[in-house]
Image (cartoon, helix red, strand yellow):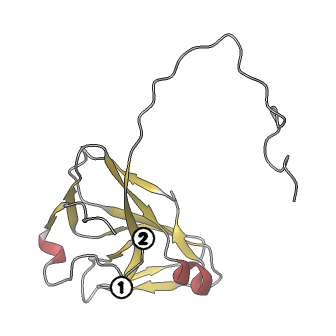
Amino acid sequence: MSDPIKVDVRQLPHAEGLPLPSYQSTQAAGLDLIAAIGEQAPLVLAAGRRAMVPTGLVIALPDGYEAQVRPRSGLAARHGVTVLNSPGTVDADYRGEINVLLVNLGSEAFTIRRGERIAQMIVAPVTRVELVRAAALPATPRGSGGFGSTGR
């Protein structure tokens, strides 16, 4: 495994006392993000509703990297709670708080408490492209077949 990329992080006052995001296994791809909501003010996410959940984190990604905010599979499988704009993108030049837009697709309300792991964050390199206008594109066997065109 290569040396880790260094990412500067600052915890905002409402995240004081919470641990920094961490990997939950030696081969985990994502760091678990934690809800930085009030100890005495859990967030009840009703079925069919969405909410922006603060993490209390501000990061400075190196140039050429992004962070992706993705759902935690356990929350989705057990409760129907997922990240609505998945994956959410944090650009290298963003310096605001990372928030997680959660939605409850389950049939029952779900309570989010301070310190609960709510999503995962993957830091990845970004490839930038240059779009070039073309009069025609090379043909492929698939052609313009879209959703469902390659089979079941």
Q: Quadrant of residue 108?
A: bottom right
**75 displayed left or right of 88:** right
Badge 2 is on which residue? 29
Disc 1 target residue: 116
Residue 148: image x %, image y %? 83, 50
In the rendered image of this protein, does residue 26 appear above or below residue 144? below
Q: Is residue 115 above or below residue 3?
A: below
* Residue at the farthest front position: 1
Q: Nearer the viewer, residue 96 or 19?
A: 19
Say which of 104 and 76 sits in front: 76
Image coords of residue 141 (percent x, y)? 84, 35
Mark 2 residue type: Ala
Label 1 element class:
loop
- Residue visible at 53% across and 17% down in the picture: 132
Question: Which quadrant of the figure contains the C terminus?
Answer: bottom right
Label annotation for residue 70: none
